[in-house]
Image (cartoon, rainbow, N blue to C red):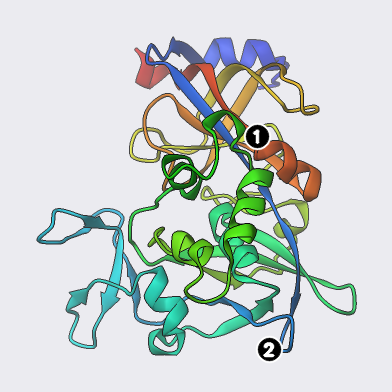
Amino acid sequence: MTWQMTGGSFFRHWFRPFRISKPGFVTAYYEPVFDARLTRQPGFETPALARPADLATLNDRPLILPSGERLTAARRAADGALSPYPDRRAIENEGAATGAKPIAYLRDPLDAFLLQVQGSGRLRLADGATLALTYDGRNGWPYTSIGRLLIERGHAMAGEMTLDCLKATLNQLGLENNAPGRQLMQENRSYVFFKIDDSPERLFGPIGGAGCPLTPLRSIAIDRGLWCYGLPFWISARVPWKKESETRLERMMIGQDTGSAIVGPARADLFFGAGEMAGHLAGRVRHAAEMTVFLPVDDAS
């Protein structure tokens, strides 16, 4: 059989659109590029850590604490028993106790924090070479939005909260041990571990949760508790995607990634690409959106 379908006829033939009635909300993320060194040295003392050997991922059967908190990862002892993994504060203050080995060292805790929030990134070494890091698990504690905390505590106005604002405010509060900015970042107990990714696929972009390279302004992160990878979504919103001013974005995007903060049927995180400008624009996106999901015909019938 010879297929001669256009993109539009392909989707009409194999999928059925369903408008998501719940009000949609989109944010955006990007692949950051940070200066780093392979060994600890003055000016580069904050580690990006590899996944510890005793970390067990528990997405399907979370560890439920007496407090009711659900941990999606935990420490597995030699006898198989599970216990909560150290949170961000403990890992940063007692990093050697986790057994996690440093992959490289970044300039400061804020660079390391942003690398974890984005889930992947590239490290620019002294000789100009780059090292691609990919998400390799997290400690399982719930994610807390630091931007929201800055707003709640009067450090920033809701309408002014962007990535640039967040970085400037945290730097002003201080990043050294026990400084207010550092303590506030540590209220996000979630901590992400990485691995070096030198696969051929990684040359085309960061690898999403679906295992394929992400495409700028076509790949999105979705709630994996509700949607499967590979589903097409039509997203319509006014966001700063070309420049700082808001312009209409209407296009088909594919669910190829996930994130701990992406929860709900009408929630999406738009991948904006790599580098400083992508980060500048992505950090400004917190917008309402209209979302339509395209379900395969067998599931839609």
The part of the image, by quadrant, that contains residue 48 is bottom right
Residue at mark 2: 40
Quadrant location, the C terminus: top left
Q: Is residue 301 above or below residue 121?
A: above
Residue type at the position of mark 1: Arg
Q: Position of residue 215 (x, y in %)?
A: 70, 40
Identified at 55% across, 60% down, the residue is 116
Identified at 53% across, 85% down, the residue is 101
What residue occupies the far right of the structure in this picture?
127
- Asked if residue 97 lies left or right of residue 166, the reply is left
Query: Mark 1 and mark 2: span between their CA atoms?
Result: 33 Å
Q: Position of residue 88 (x, y in %)?
A: 41, 69
Q: Which mark is residue 100?
A: none
**Does dot 2 land on a helix, a strand or a loop?**
loop
Q: Which mark is residue 284?
A: 1
Q: Position of residue 187 (x, y in %)?
A: 39, 60
Residue type at the position of mark 2: Arg
Q: Residues within 10 Å of mark 1 (few under 14, many from 20)?
A: many
Identified at 65% across, 34% down, the residue is 284
Q: Give the mark nearest the N terminus, 1 or 2.
A: 2
Quadrant location, the N terminus: top right
Identified at 77% across, 28% down, the residue is 244
- Asked if residue 80 lies left or right of residue 164, the reply is left
- Asked if residue 138 lies left or right of residue 130, the reply is left
The part of the image, by quadrant, that contains residue 70 is bottom left
The part of the image, by quadrant, that contains residue 29 is top right
Q: Would you say the residues marked 1 and 2 are in contact, meaning their CB atoms lie under 8 Å apart?
A: no
